[in-house]
Image: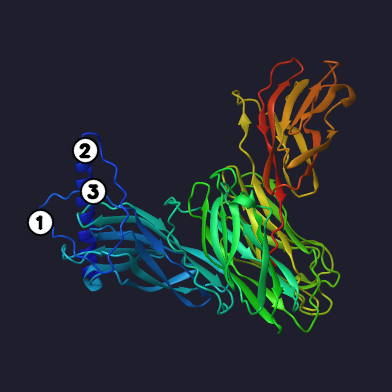
Amino acid sequence: MKKILCKIVTIAMLVTMFSTVVNLCTASAAPNGPTQAVTKHHKHPSKPVKPPKTPKYATPTPTATETLVIEGGSVNSQTGKEVCVPIKLTCVPDNGIVSTDMSISYDTSILKYTGGSAGDIVPDPDANFAIAETSPGVLKLLFVDTTNLDKHICTDGVFAELNFKINISVSYQTSIKIYDITVGDGNYASVPTKAIDGYVYIAETTPHPSIPSMTTPPPTTPEPSSTPSTYTLRIGAGTLNAAENDNITLPINYMNVPANGISACNFTITYDPQQLEYISYEPGNIVPNPDVNFAINKAEDGCLKLLFLDHTIGNECINFDGIVANLNFKVVGHTSGLTFIDLCYATVADLNLNVIATELCSGSVTINSLVTPTPLSSFEITVGSKQASPNENVTLPIYFDDVPAIGISTCDFTITYDPKQLEFLSYEPGSIVPNPDTNFSLVKTSEGSLKLLFIDFTMENEFIKSGGIVANLNFKVIGSSYEVTHINISNQTVGDINLYSVPTAVYPGSVIIDIPAVQTPNPQSDFCCKVGSGDAKIGDTITIPVNFENVPDKGIAACNMTITYDSTQLEFVENEVGSIVKNPDMNFAINKLEDGTIKILFVDCTMKDEYITSNGLFTNLTFKVLPTKCGITSINVVNATFGDIDLNNLNTTIVPGVINVLGSTEIN
């Protein structure tokens, strides 16, 4: 095997070098530089076709070709099981592939590589194909037609199959990344490629039989970029209790929507028509202009197709987490049991038409024909939000609100965060947790994922009875630039003292990594005008402070500034003058010029002894959060001028603030 591998590596290097030299020579020989490849659309033969033989010393000519798509499969599996991930080739050039090499990476803390084999499109794999694990977590795949005549790859299909064993014991999603690709066609010309990463979706318990494969077919139009998405969009169906003949509404939720939005999305929703009868749907509140951009169609009993497309291609994309659709069903099953609502075959693209990695979470309806189901409650789990600077430690509380009167005896959920922005340090149980040494635990299952568990082991008198903080999470900020990074809750299961499921709304939190200072040309001035930040739910009022820091020795005798905000998300209510302002009735004025614009003026009218001399609160601004959309909205200071007691202009650092508008994600 080592001899074969060395031979293949050598030939691949020679073929790649020869292909590169030929392309450079051809490009430099052209009178106007390299010519643009012409895209061809063709049907690939169902059987391999031998390419024409090339004379041994013939000068190869680059071939205009389509982009070769190299796609990792996306598969479902279970903890502790083995899984096979296919690597597929699509749009193989007409004159075949004579050589290719690529690297595959995976997370060794989640997957263990157990072996691999060539796919059915590889001729004579014993001579022409090899897989080697070059280092932990990195595989090298090589193919070379050692005959250089008639063992090319000529058809689309499975190029390789990689076998892994799942090491972890919790639900998770992990990627199979494809990179460092070199491909030469039958004329030794370099073939352009596009890589699509694969994914393994790991379920904590045995999946029900109705779950279909989640392999996503290669996207056609629009054509996505080859750059992998840095986000993983989570699409989840809700979970409910119901009785026979009940009408129910099941939400479909988006979480972790990327900053540049979602411009296109389609996926399939399946259910058991013997248990549920589909009635209708309503678009969710995150869908812009749904009459034009959104549709759900029943393809057949038990199968729905959801489609969203921003027809403006830019102005009506989905920008926020929340409910994308509510599905209305009637329960027609006659016996108690669990029936699943599955999501599959998803294709999602952002505003730049890049494919977004997607995690799909099934929902369920528990049908109980014997016991009246627990009435719906408004129980909420909320993650707090904080503002912090790089290298600071920050503590985020997790709150339980509107705890049902009967109490909570069991609860578990997953907490996810971006490990590139935050490092988890520790936790403390909250004050509402009885006997936490016995009943409470929180563990880090992997980088970026925590698991929280509470259970009343007495099953009698140590359940959670009231709202408040259930846990405090301690993180270190390791991100080095401005970022709003989210802390999400998912896969939650909550039970009351009778062990009935409690419907739950979850509100993600965020850490706002301080916005880099906006400084005027003289960096020697340390004076800073800083707007505070916070988080609020729709309908709440929130007070944002404006603080002065590092006030100079000669004080602040005059200042005027304009405050701007998004009037579609916030309504200005009132202000309160801060403690550092002397004689505010004479020296301070504030005026709302129009919705979204506030003017503030301070002048020491004595020009002697009522100027600002100390750090602290300049003013508080109170806003009401309007019921329009969720996400981050900024409070900015513009056109600001500050002068000291001698009326010298002060160079000033301005730090804007942000409000994180929270929205409910109704996944139980």
Assess whether mark 3 and mark 1 are in contact (beta carbons under 8 angstroms): no
Q: Quadrant of residue 585?
A: top right
Q: Which numbered mark, 2 or 3, is in the foreground of this view?
A: 2
Q: Position of residue 184 (x, y in %)?
A: 25, 56
Taking the spot 19% from the left edge, 47% from the top edge, the residue there is: 22
Q: Earlier in the sequence, mark 1 or mark 2?
A: 2
Determine whether the residue tagged by mark 2 lies in a helix, strand or loop.
helix
Q: Position of residue 67 (x, y in %)?
A: 34, 53
Q: Is residue 25 above or below residue 557?
A: below
Q: Nearer the viewer, residue 349 or 10?
A: 349
Q: Position of residue 187 (x, y in %)?
A: 19, 54
Q: Position of residue 383 (x, y in %)?
A: 71, 57
Name the kind of residue labelled 3 in the image.
Thr
Left or right of 374? Residue 293 is left
Determine whether the residue tagged by mark 1 lies in a helix, strand or loop.
loop
Q: Earlier in the sequence, mark 2 or mark 3?
A: 3
Quarter occupied by the C terminus: bottom right
The residue at which mark 1 appears reads as: 55
Q: Nearer the viewer, residue 598 or 336?
A: 336
Rendering colour mode = rainbow
**Alpha carbons under labels 1 and 2: distance apart:** 24 Å
Q: Residues within 10 Å of mark 3 (few under 14, many from 20)?
A: some
**Alpha carbons under labels 2 and 3: distance apart:** 12 Å
Quarter occupied by the N terminus: bottom left
The residue at which mark 3 appears reads as: 20
Taking the spot 78% from the left edge, 39% from the top edge, the residue there is: 571
The residue at which mark 2 appears reads as: 28
Q: Residues within 10 Å of mark 2 (few under 14, many from 20)?
A: few
Name the kind of residue labelled 1 in the image.
Pro
